[in-house]
Amino acid sequence: MQETDCPPAASKLKLRFEAVNFADIPGQSELFLRYQSDPLSLQKYYPSAIRSHADVAARIPEVLNAYSIDRQVLTDILEEQNRKYGAGEETLANIELLRRDDTVTVVTGQQAGLFTGPLYTIYKALSAIKMAECLRGRGLNAVPIFWAATEDHDFAEISRAFMLDNGNGPIEFKLDQTDDSKERPVGAIPIAASFAEELLNNLSKLPETEFTADLRETLSKIWAPGRTIGESFGAHIQSLFRKYGLIVVDPLDVRLKSLVAPIYAAAAEHADAIVEALVNRSAELEADGFQPQVLVTPDYFPLFYHTDDGARRSLRRKSDGKYRASDTKLEFSREELGKLALNEPARFSPGVMLRPVVQDYLFPTICYFGGGAEIAYFAQNSEVYRILNRPATVILHRQSFTIVEAKQSKTLEKYDLDFKDLFGGFENLLPGIVERFINPSSARLFADAEEKINLQLSHLDQELSKIDPTLAMNLATRRRKILYHIAALQKKFHRVQIERDEVLDRQLRSLFATLLPDGNLQERKLNVGSFTARYGTYFIDWLYDSIDLDERGHRLLYL
């Protein structure tokens, strides 16, 4: 079959895009940037690297030959889980398709965050959906899988969600954690009764549109006290992607753990080799000028242990060769852990270095869509694939957007700003705005003052140098202080000018709050509810229409 690209769907709204290279965005790792620009040059770290998403189909025979899970047992579990989440007919049809021996999966996943977490969770899901559709369009059976990382125990990271109020200020939603839920997998933690009142109070701050009532009803129903975070997360994902056929999987299910018990046991058996390889891989990355994403120390173990009280504990190797579960007195030999993993798999969950291997053992994964950090740590855990004799999965970067609404677009245009100008921060943007649009003469005024001060100080320096060189040195120090204070005064002047212009101040602050909240890309901070409150679930459709799997950069999407 001829390899062809999967073109983006033509947006019915004819939305406008603007591409931004990740190299122009602060905070990107060198490894991620290289992978995006030239993945084949990194085959040392990514043995299955491909030039384009269109090349993944060539891996299908290898993936299917290495797959041994009983599909009927797996799909029965998935059907039960997804029916519980309120899945639509499209998802159920995809589960049926997965029963076939020639069906592969496109996988993505994310922690089970409040209201689905930041926007990039949505972009991950849509990327996987689009890739599966692309493969099916070429006559290949493929379905999209969303791995809800319910086993993680970082409650602080998943317990907050941020939306925008009428004035584009942040609304923070926050789940409370009880003492008895600490260290437990987040997916098993029930939503506290206190959340209901906070939810209603915060939802009242959303802008009133024709879609706000639906959003309030959806969130109140799905994130109801008593339900676990995992259940609510799965139901929320399905409510957003109901017609797109996305299959959600909750790995906390003990039946799924039984299916992956052999790979747990293999990881325990080869733990020493895994750790040695990961430590060496980190050293290789550093030698090549890259920063390892995950710190792996010689006492590392690739599995977490779940105690009787439900806590998820890391296992660390002691000097006598045994492994101790953190904050407990429980100790095991490597052989004991291997037997336990095989016979009581519910006692375990994979760490970040093993989780992709477990995912790809459970599913016939043709590729995985992740973020920049995930791409970086795949350079390390490709060694785990090698040691466990599993085919290393192709990782592709998820789609990446900043949503620019009409108000923000007008502000950018009015003040002749580029999105990249925002990376310098609010304070650094002020001088140009004030000097071009508010008080053009101020720049010349301060420049003249600085020039005259420098001129007079230079004359003074010449005279002092003739009398006593130490006086000239003292003057140089004071000159720097004088100029520093002039610059500080100029900054204060710019700030005052902006504050006196209430409209401009509000426009600029709104610009940062929506496009670069707290200095982060929008997709890393804001929740999808900010936009479904304004546009309903049409927003999901617009995003789906905007997916372009050939795009390796970040894109501004103008609504």
Image (tube, rainbow, N blue to C red):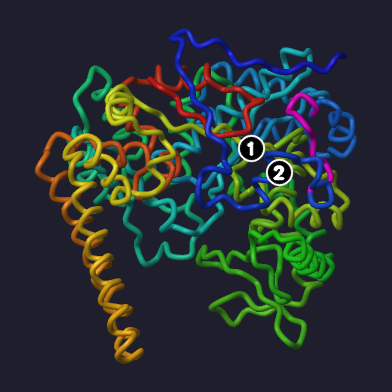
Looking at the figure, which quarter contains the N terminus? top right
Pointer 2: what residue? 35
For label 2, count other residues whose C-alpha is less than 10 Å away and answer few (under 14), some (14-19) or many (20+): many
Asked whether the beta carbons under mark 1 and mark 2 sit within 8 Å of each other, the answer is yes
Residue 312 picture location, percent across and down: 55, 64
Residue 555 is one of the magenta-drawn residues: no
Residue 372 picture location, percent across and down: 60, 46
Q: In the rendered structure, which segment of residues is drawn in magenta?
A: 46-55
Q: Which numbered disc flags the more N-terminal residue, 1 or 2?
A: 2
**Location of residue 273 by image quarter:** bottom right
The dominant secondary structure in magenta is loop
**Location of residue 433 by image quarter:** top left
Pointer 1: what residue? 397
Residue 255 picture location, percent across and down: 66, 45
Asked whether the viewer can see residue 268, the reply is no
For label 1, count other residues whose C-alpha is less than 10 Å away and answer few (under 14), some (14-19) or many (20+): many
Q: Amino acid at mark 1?
A: His
Residue 106 picture location, percent across and down: 69, 31
Extreme-left residue of the structure: 500
* Residue 281 to residue 20: above or below: below
